[in-house]
Amino acid sequence: MATPQMRVQGPAKLEKLEAAEQGERRYVASRRHAALRLLAAERSEEIYPVLLEEIVALGFPRAMLEVVDFDAGVLAPVASINCSKKYQQRFRTTLWAAENPIVRVLHSGTPTVLPDLATGRNPLYCHPIVFRSRNLCWEAEREHRSDCLALANYRRERKVQLQEQLCSICEIRAYAGVVLVDLTREHSERDLADVRSLIEIANRYLSRIFRTEHHYNRMTDMEVTIRQMQTVMQSMADPVILTDAQHRVITQNQAAERFFKVPENVSEGRIRAVELNNLLFSAALSSMSVSGGEASRDLTLVDAIEGEEMLFEAVCAPTYGREGLRTGLVTVMRDVTDLRRADEEVRANLALLRQAEELVRQDRDRLNLIVENVGDPIVVSDGAAKIVLVDPLAQELFGSENADRSPIQLRNQAKLDAYVTGFTFSFSDREGGPLRLVHPGSRIEIEYDARSGKIYDERGQVAFTVTVLRDLTAVRKVEQLKLEHRMLEIEKFAATGRLAGTIAHEVNNPMEAIKNAIYLLAGKLRPEATPVYDILKSETERVARIVRQMLGLYRNTDQIGSVDVNNVMEDTLLLFSRQLERGGIRVETRLDKLPALVGSADQLRQVLSNLVVNAKDGMPQGGQLVVRTRHLPALDGIHGWVRIVVADDGSGIPESMLHSIFEPFVTTKGEKGTGLGLWIVKGIIENHAGKIRVRSKPGRGTVFKIDLPVVR
Amino acid sequence: MKRKTHKHRILVVDDEPNVLTTYKLILEQKGYQVIGAISSAEARAALDSQELDLLLCDLSLEEKHTGFDIIDYARQRQPDLPSVLLTGYATVEVSERAAQRSVTVLFKPIDISEFLETISAHLRNAHEQAKASGE
């Protein structure tokens, strides 16, 4: 080990040994002064002039010192005494000049007396100096190596290779140079030996100072490096922490201090946050250090200033000392809060997206399934009414763009185009209409009900139109069947009516005889028989009314066909016009233009007669009868209804009876009514597939509304 | 005065004997001279044999014969003979045919007061017309 004591002792010992070597104690004593002067030099450059002065003091006329500039590859004078500039200049040389005797001396490492090179008058003593030491340098000593440059130079194991004057251990670049001393005739061998020992001492001191200076320079360099490294560390936004083997913090940057250093003058909470962070960090370090090499780990820390929780990814690398021992850990923490948050968000969004995608897929599948199973041709067109999509059924009708199309398909397409174009540029959102197309296979014309809707884009422009073609063949067939069924029902009712009429007619004649007979008996009975007579008379009159009502059901001309309700209404009003007039009843009629109905005109006449008579009877003091007819087109455009309204402002129907007035033998007219009128009315309307409704308020009047279906 | 001296003569035609009898009795009770006919043949015979003031005739007679046939037959002889058709069939067709012949239609069952009023009105009209044409 190099200790300061040794270093002090070293040269003294050496001095002694060298003195003993040379056996010249006298020299040591007499030249102690010069040695002390050299020893006093603190810096390498101070040694040069002292050395030259001491040489001249020995009695030599002049001396000069040259050193090698390794960078330039030049040997140049650096100090001199009694040497002119011009003289000095002559000794300047490159290291490559192998023929130069001085360069040769430098390489050989051996002091040599050269014949005078410059003036030819005096020989020149040339003494090479190079960085050398008897002792290993401290680095070599510590690393137990023996290839120290200083020692190698001292031992002169090989020729001084100026190119190799760099220590592989302590990285010291050696100095090299020569001391040139002018000799005169009077200088003895002894004088020369003095100079030689003087130079050797000086070189020994120089080497020592040079080594110290080298270490000082290295230290300064390292300080710069440390400062640079610190700057780098501080300037890192991520927390960086260097810990020792016991996980104690050696150093940390500002970003780390935010989390791990207890700040001054702060709240309890913040201190606790920092303590918690340190605890978490230590735990993380312990677990990471087990792994040996580099390790990473997620760590949640609390920002002591903001109070927020932050997620870090701590990456940890061990640091090693010179001997390969682990000295601690460097931990760099990356703030992944935002990253994780973004990651989580991305994950969540991805999940949502997948969900939405799944929904869309399901919707699409469902829609496809629906489209495939609608069983009706479907056509999707774009905003310019150009067909973009057809289902297989529609393709059959219109063909496809790419394939050859038959004339029938082209004609169908033309009809469809006309319809779709009309719809696309219309103002309505939905539209329907008939479309007659020819089926290419069977060549049969089919009536379609085209239903269309619009799909708008975000700017409100028509993006697509969807048209579904409904084959009306089946609908028409059902309608036909319904119509036939209804006609059969009407026919049945008529047959029943005929039967009732026939019976009534047969009853009518005996009734007539009975009634007449009762009349003839009037006044011819004993007074006590009068009540019996009255019963006979009133009951017979009642039977007569029933018979009359039943007779109405029978018509010779009963036929089913096309009926104009307005005509029937006018006939009926005409038939009763005198009676109505006599009853003080004003009639207001509003008959709109109506489509024809299929049914029995006579039965409908009976219906209207009944209602008009009822209205008249409901207004014994006179009043107003309102009769209206109008056409209600149905939403589907196929069917419609004819509405008949018969309203009066008469006495009305009591609420208790309102629900039962269509039942047989219910009457508001007391003895005078048969209770059959409205029952027959309802039967007829229902046979015509119609509906009848009544609204009434006692004292305000009664409204009958009849809706009869129109079949085209 | 004339009314008291001359009884109006009415022919009643109906294929139902009881109906015919009761009409006859009612009218006789009112002081008319009534001739009853149970069939179209009897009616024709009655029309052939005498002058009448009024014809009351049921619409449906035996074997598809109708009241219109009788009225038409009577009008051939007495074109201005007032005629009343009695019927149970209240149809438009009947009403129209009756209107063509200016025949009053009474629907059975007949209200007797209306029946009597119609008859007396017809007779009064005929009398006034005759008086007007006589002058």
Image (spheres, helix red, strand yellow):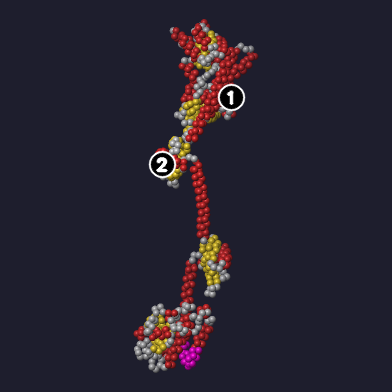
- In-front residue for pair B36/A153: A153
In 3D space, how far apart are the residues under numbered discs 2 and 1 (Cα atoms)? 69 Å
- Residue A25 located within the stretch drawn in magenta: yes
| Front one among A470 and A327 | A470
The disc, 2 or 1, on the residue closer to the chain's N-terminal end is 2
Q: Is residue A259 left or right of residue A446?
A: right
Between residue A22 and residue A160, name the one nearer to us: A160
Give the crowd class for mark 2: few <14, some 14-19, many >=20 residues within 10 Å.
some
Residue A15 in percent (x, y) is at 49, 88
Badge 1: chain ID: A
Q: Which residue is disc 2 drawn over? A: A405
Tell me, yes or no, whether dots 2 and 1 are on the same chain: yes
Which mark is on residue A665?
1
Q: Tell how many labels.
A: 2
Indicate the position of residue A356 as horizontal and vertical percent values.
51, 50
Indicate the secondary structure of the residue bearing disc 1. Answer: loop
The amino acid type found where label 2 is placed reads Arg
- Could one spot residue A238 in this view of the protein? yes
Q: Quadrant of the N terminus of chain A?
A: bottom right
Q: Residue furthest right?
A: A528
Above-or-below relation of A569 to B134: below
Q: Nearer the viewer, mark 2 or mark 1?
A: 2
Whole-percent x, y for residue A58 in the image = 42, 91
Q: Element at badge 2? A: loop
Looking at the rendering, the stretch of residues picked out in magenta corresponds to A17-38
Query: In which chain is the residue bearing label 2?
Result: A
Q: Nearer the viewer, residue A165 or A460?
A: A165
Q: Is residue A114 magenta?
A: no
Amino acid on which the number 1 mark rests in the picture: Phe
